[in-house]
Amino acid sequence: MKFAMTIMATAIALTASCAVDAKIQPISQTNDTLTAVASAREPQGLRIAAEAGLRSVISELTRDLKAGSLPAEFPFDVNDLSELKLAKLGLSFEVNTIQPQTLLAGNRPMEQMVTGTGIWNFVVMVNNSPVALLELEKNYGKWVVNGVGGAKLAQDVQAAAQNHSAKDAFRFVRI
């Protein structure tokens, strides 16, 4: 079973709007801080559903795979299936959008053009390294996994979040 991250194929922009925190912290401490700040903004029940969804996706994707083998285009950036036992959720963020007609009109500051989509992504971490994004959306009142993948984007999001580590430092915007 494949989980496509179709959202990742569209035009995406990360907007940063704060000063860079000049304190250098160990990566694991920075990741924990980012996760704590992000989880404070998450809708109720989202992280619990994401944890269950992550385990379910890993189980589904690895069910028929042999140890030491990874298929082409595997959605997690890992070297071996055994690494997925260490997978955990990191930073979460809502996917925002700006309607193209609103952007073209340009009659408001960009911050006022951005609207939430209700779609949330989690950076999936293995050994403090981002290996994928896990996407969830509420469907009939229940959080469900839409897809997994986008390892390179997960790395970029994690780096941007670390570089702009103040609360509400960036928004993920899909146009």
Image (cartoon, helix red, strand yellow):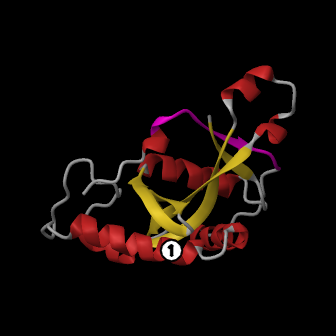
Locate residue 93, reporting x and y percent: 63, 58
**Left or right: where does residue 75 sit relative to residue 162?**
left
Q: Residue at x 68, y 33 (%)?
A: 99
**Who is closer to the viewer here, 13 or 144?**
144
For the point 35% across and 58% down, which residue is it? 76
Name the side, left or right, on which 115 lies relative to 48: right
Number of marks drawn? 1
Q: Give the camera-side residue of 121 and 141.
A: 141
Q: Is residue 70 left or right of residue 93?
A: left
Q: Quadrant of residue 105?
A: top right
Where in the figure is residue 132, as x and y percent of width and height? 43, 57
> Disc 1 marks which residue?
49
How far from the left and from the top, in percent, is residue 117? Answer: 64, 49
Outermost residue to the front: 140
From this viewpoint, is residue 165 visible? yes
Say if residue 87 shows up in the picture.
no
Query: What's the residue at 62%, 34% (across, down)?
Result: 175
Q: Is residue 98 magenta?
A: no
Residue 6 horizontal/vertical position (percent) = 43, 42
Q: In the image shown, does 108 or 164 lie closer to the viewer?
A: 108
Type of amino acid at the residue the image marks with label 1: Ala
Q: Which residues are magenta?
A: 9-18
Residue found farthest to the right? 108
What SS does tag 1 mark? helix
Q: What residue appears at the point 26 percent right and 68 percent down from the top-left corner?
A: 60
Q: Is residue 138 above or below residue 71?
A: below
In magenta stretch: residue 14 = yes
